[in-house]
Amino acid sequence: MCPKMALDMYGLDLQIDPEKCICCGICTKACPVGALKITEVDDA
């Protein structure tokens, strides 16, 4: 679902590559259990 291929599955663990993620929200809409959400990250 991710247009930037920022999601990878490792066994049962989903990992998101923050370098690739553009926060488009497609993954949050596609997640069947609502386990994903987009939040702001403070890089300070």
Image (tube, rainbow, N blue to C red):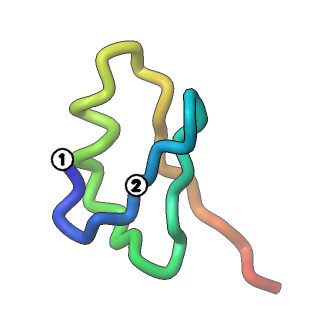
- Tell me where residue 44 appears, x and y as whole percent: 82, 85
Q: Is residue 28 above or below residue 2?
A: above
Query: Residue lying farthest top?
Result: 33
Under tag 1, what secondary structure? loop
Q: Residues within 10 Å of mark 1 (few under 14, many from 20)?
A: few
Q: Is residue 44 above or below residue 39?
A: below
Taking 38 as reference, is 29 left or right?
Answer: left
Residue 44 versus residue 35: which sits nearer the camera? 35
Query: Residue lying farthest bottom?
Result: 44
Question: Could you tell me which residue is drawn at 55 percent across and 43 percent down?
Answer: 10
Taking 6 as reference, is 39 left or right?
Answer: right
For badge 1, the amino acid type reads: Met
Query: Residue lying farthest front?
Result: 11
Residue 7 versus residue 35: which sits nearer the camera? 7
Q: Residues within 10 Å of mark 2 (few under 14, many from 20)?
A: some
- Tell me where residue 17 appears, x and y as whole percent: 51, 67
Question: Could you tell me which residue is drawn at 66 percent across and 67 percent down?
Answer: 41
Question: Could you tell me which residue is drawn at 18 percent across and 47 percent down?
Answer: 1
| Residue to which mark 2 is pinned | 7
Taking 16 as reference, is 26 left or right?
Answer: left
**Which corner quadrant of the image does residue 27 belong to?**
top left
- Tell me where residue 2 appears, x and y as whole percent: 23, 56
Indicate which disc, 1 or 2, sits on the residue closer to the N terminus. Answer: 1
Mark 1 to mark 2 CA distance (whole Å): 9 Å
The number of numbered badges drawn on the structure is: 2
**Do the numbered discs 1 and 2 sit on residues whose CB atoms are within 8 Å?**
yes
- Tell me where residue 42 appears, x and y as whole percent: 72, 74
| Residue to which mark 1 is pinned | 1
Question: Could you tell me which residue is drawn at 47 percent across and 43 percent down?
Answer: 9
**Which corner quadrant of the image does residue 31 belong to?**
top left
For badge 2, the amino acid type reads: Leu
Under tag 2, what secondary structure? strand
